[in-house]
Image (cartoon, coloured by chain):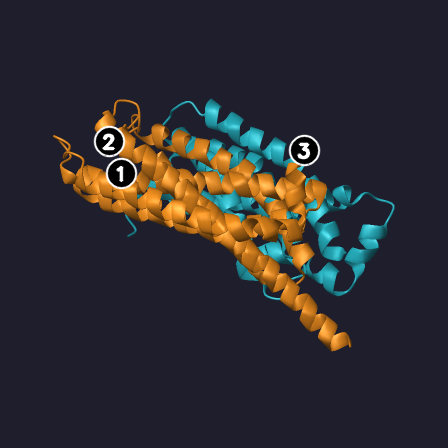
Amino acid sequence: MASFWEYANPLKFMRTTDWLLPIVAVAAAVVTSTGLIWGFFYTPDDFRQGATVKIVFLHVPAAMMAINAWVMMLVASLVWLIRRHHVSALAAKAAAPVGLVMTLIGLITGSVWGQPMWGTWWAWDPRLTSFLILFLFYLGYIALWAAIDDPDTGADLTAVLCIVGSVFAVLSRYAAIFWNQGLHQGASLSVAPGTRMDWAYKAPLYISMTGFGLIFLALVLAGTRTEIRARRMKALVMRERMA
Amino acid sequence: MGPEPGTLALIAPGILWVGALLACLLSLDRIFALDYEDGSLDLLATAPVPLEAVVTIKALAHWLTTGLPLVLISPVMGLLLFLPGEAYLWLILSLLLGTPALSVIGTFGAALTVGLKRGGLLLSLLVLPLYIPTLVFGAEVVARGAQGLSTATPLALLAGITLGAVALLPFASALVLRINLR
């Protein structure tokens, strides 16, 4: 019985992802393009929102992955702090830029969608505010990784930052909700997906969400492999110098 | 923004709290920097006092030199911004309750970036998102106080954040300090 922790061994990880990564990458490309093409070209226009509603197929999956990426980083950070598996720390490092871009896609598509729907590019709605804060958290996390030379120190510090940041990110989310409702009446600007959506929209949306999950997986695997190779190269250079 | 009393009074709660936050931010990188440079931080880390206690005292010292003066000077600042009369009590109370959280969270940020040469900007970037809940609830207390509304909820949440931060964050700060001194 193979244990999940076997993949903490970089060699085993590299060997497995060697054949897994192309499969995941191709699957990500196929599923995402299916979801997006279906969503953009083969769904009817909404009777009130028109064709603008179709940005949902980009907006919701990106926003979902922006949050999921942070959760994955949190789990990976905990694994690193508790079990000291280097692959875990490197996976967290590789996930951060992907999460940052997903947050940015969520913010930009939301802004583009908000312009015709709400008549504004930006509103201090709780969700928008939370995402802006999440964006700052990603920036800080990536900047801290970049600022520290020693890889183990960097992994430790960013892991602690990720854990503390998670607590404050949740607090910020509730603070944003509280703040907004404190000033205005509960504005129901955000459209909850999946609740009262027709299957004509729901099916491509689910496919697109799966596709974005696969994209994230493929990019994190590729990023982790790059990090592992960079570590090996560094070790080789060091050995060269010592000899 | 203009000098109109009406406009200033409207934005005073937010401005005063943002001002307090920025004033805290400015002095954060001095919490550990000097001790790190002259080696006294290593002595503190090896001292019989737990590092968690050292970190807590450091945060307290930061609060005494930054947070407390801000609390004391805040009525004058409120006067300059035409803060409504009924909001003064809430301004002082919210700053008194909230600024300790700013110092404790800031100490965590300072501990995180202590070994870095150009840590100042990074420190601000790391600490700013951590400050947001404190800022929101603190400013909300004053804003509600100025409008004569009930301030109990944001005040309780603000106190909750401060107590939670004071109780838990020193452990995280001490942890990252140990990592940085390794």
Q: In the figure, is residue B131 to the left or right of A132?
A: right
What distance separates the C-alpha of mark 1 from that of mark 3?
42 Å
Quarter the N terminus of chain A occupies: top right
Question: Circles 2 and 1: CB distance less than 8 Å?
Answer: yes
From the viewer's side, name the closer residue of A222 and A21: A21
The label nearer to you, 3 versus 2, is: 3
Q: Residue at x 68, y 43 (%)?
A: A81
Q: In the figure, is residue A132 to the left or right of A96?
A: left
Q: Are marks 3 and 2 on the same chain?
A: yes
Query: Where residue A76 appears, x then y in whole percent?
Result: 60, 42
Give the chain letter for orange.
A
What's the residue type where badge 3 is placed?
Met
Chain identity of mark 1: A
**Res B167 → quadrant:** top right
Q: Residue at x 64, y 40 (%)?
A: A78
Q: In the figure, is residue B110 to the left or right of A44?
A: right
Point out which mark residue A1 bears: 3
From the viewer's side, name the closer residue of B64 and A237: A237
What distance separates the C-alpha of mark 3 from that of mark 2?
42 Å
The label nearer to you, 2 versus 1, is: 2
Q: How many marks?
A: 3
Mark with earlier residue (1, 3)? 3
Give the chain letter for cyan.
B
What's the residue type where badge 2 is placed?
Tyr
Query: Where residue A47 appears, x then y in whole percent?
Result: 12, 30
From the viewer's side, name the closer residue of A179 and A8: A8
* Pointer 2 local density, CA inside 10 Å: few below 14, some 14–19, many at least 20: many
Point out which mark residue A201 bears: 2
The label nearer to you, 1 versus 3, is: 3
Chain identity of mark 2: A
Above/below status of A193 relative to B37: above
What's the residue type where badge 1 is placed?
Val
